[in-house]
Each structure stands twice: as structure tokens, then as C-alpha cells.
Image (cartoon, helix red, strand yellow):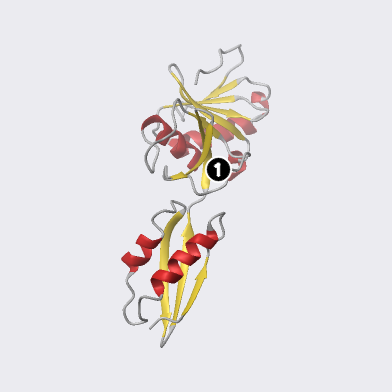
Amino acid sequence: SVQQVRIVGADGPQARQIRTALALAARNMTTLDVRLSALKAAVSPYPSVAQLHVTTSFPHTMTIRVHERRAVAVVQAAGTTVGVADDGTVLRDQAVDPSLPSIVLSEVPSGRRVSGAALNDVRLLAAAPSALAAHIEQVSQDPVHGMVVQLRQGPRLYFGDAGQLRAKWMAAAAVLAAPGSAGAPYIDVTVPSRPAAGSGNDAPSQH
């Protein structure tokens, strides 16, 4: 029977609850009969848990490594703010990091994941190079420009649809690094092979 349970990797706001749930489930098993489905069921109320990796040491020890989802953005709707992971999972069990980019919606997501345009926004953020991700203030949808990224103290980035996201980010990074783009109010990477830095007064995008 499992008598010693080692749990590593759970360090979020509800880490104690996650560890307790896993330990209780594990002690109903033996080191020769690990029921991963039962362990997953024990932490199903916690969306931050992405995967579990289990090893045992005969006769009585089980080690459970918890792989947690991390928020790439915060969803704001109807006065509520929740984190969302790079796969669209809504992280209601995690504290909100105010420095993350925001996605403004008309209503709070009711399911475990965001969908539609909001999911495309999340995928856009997940594809962002780390050097630029820290400078993203908000992602919104515009009827003319499609997905729009607002950089902190920087230009708007027009991405169009959800295709070729990595190529579009590479194009945006190249234009931002070019001396000639300094002060441009927007950069259009809708066609990543032909990025353009705007020089006129473009109307702000609408949420």
C-alpha cells in the first residue's frame, strides 16, 4: 500500500488543496496498482492542473509531479477578471496577475475554456516572442483590422485573421526593430511578407 506520497510542482494559490486531494487518492492505491484516472479525477476541480506524472518506489512510496497551466492573459468581463491559459482554459483557481495582457469580453466564459474570437486572441498571445510578450497591454477584435494588439507605450499591431501567427509576430518584431518605424502609430502585419508601419492617424480599434 502507498504510505508515503511526495508531491512536487504544485505551487499555485490552491496548491494545498491540490496536494491534499492527490494524497488522499494515492493512499487508496498500491505501488503496483497506480490508477492515474483516479488521481486525475481528484484534481479535476482545479483547472490549473494540466498533467500528472507518477512514479513509485517499492514498497510504499509514490511520487506525483504536477504540471500546471500558466496564465498568458486575463479575461475581463462584467466586472470579473480571470486568468486564461495558452490552450484557452479558464483558470478560476489562480490569482490574477495584473501585469498580463487583457482580453475584454462582453460576458464571463461559462465553460472551462474560452472559444471563438477569444480563443484566437489567446493563441495570438501564446505565439508572441518572449521579448514582446511582456510589452502587450491588450488584445481586441476590430471589424476592419481583425485581431489588434496594443503594446504598452507603443504602437498597435494589426494581425488580421488567426493564420500564420508566428510569421506575423516575426514580421512585427522586424518592423519594430527598424529605425524607420519609430513613432509609427500602428504596424500592419496582416500579410507577414509585406508588413507596413503606419504614418498617419489611424482610428483606434474597437473592442
Tell me if 35 is positioned left or right of 93 in this view. Answer: left
Residue drawn where x is 44% and y is 32% of the image = 108
The answer to whether residue 132 is visible is yes
Q: In which quarter of the image is residue 138?
A: top right
Task: Decide: is 32 above or below 45.
Answer: below
- 53, above or below 72, in the image: below
| Residue closer to the observer: 9 or 163 | 9
Left or right position of 184 against 59: right
Q: What residue did someone put label 1 on? A: 129
Q: What's the residue at 58%, 18% (across, down)? A: 198
Which image quarter: residue 51?
Answer: bottom left
Tell me the amino acid under the disc marked 1: Pro
* Helix, strand or loop under label 1: loop
Where is residue 75? Give x, y as percent. 50, 35
- Give above or below for 19 relative to 106: below
Q: How crowded is mark 1: few (under 14 residues within 10 Å), some or many (20 or more)?
A: few
Residue at image point 64% right, 24% down: 181
Instruction: In this rendered view, identify the residue nearer to me: 110 or 124.
Output: 110
Residue 24 lies in quadrant: bottom left
Q: Nearer the viewer, residue 15 or 123?
A: 15
- Percent x, y of residue 17: 50, 60
Question: Can residue 127 be seen?
Answer: no
- Quadrant where the N terminus sits is bottom left
Residue 55, position as x, y percentages in the image: 42, 76
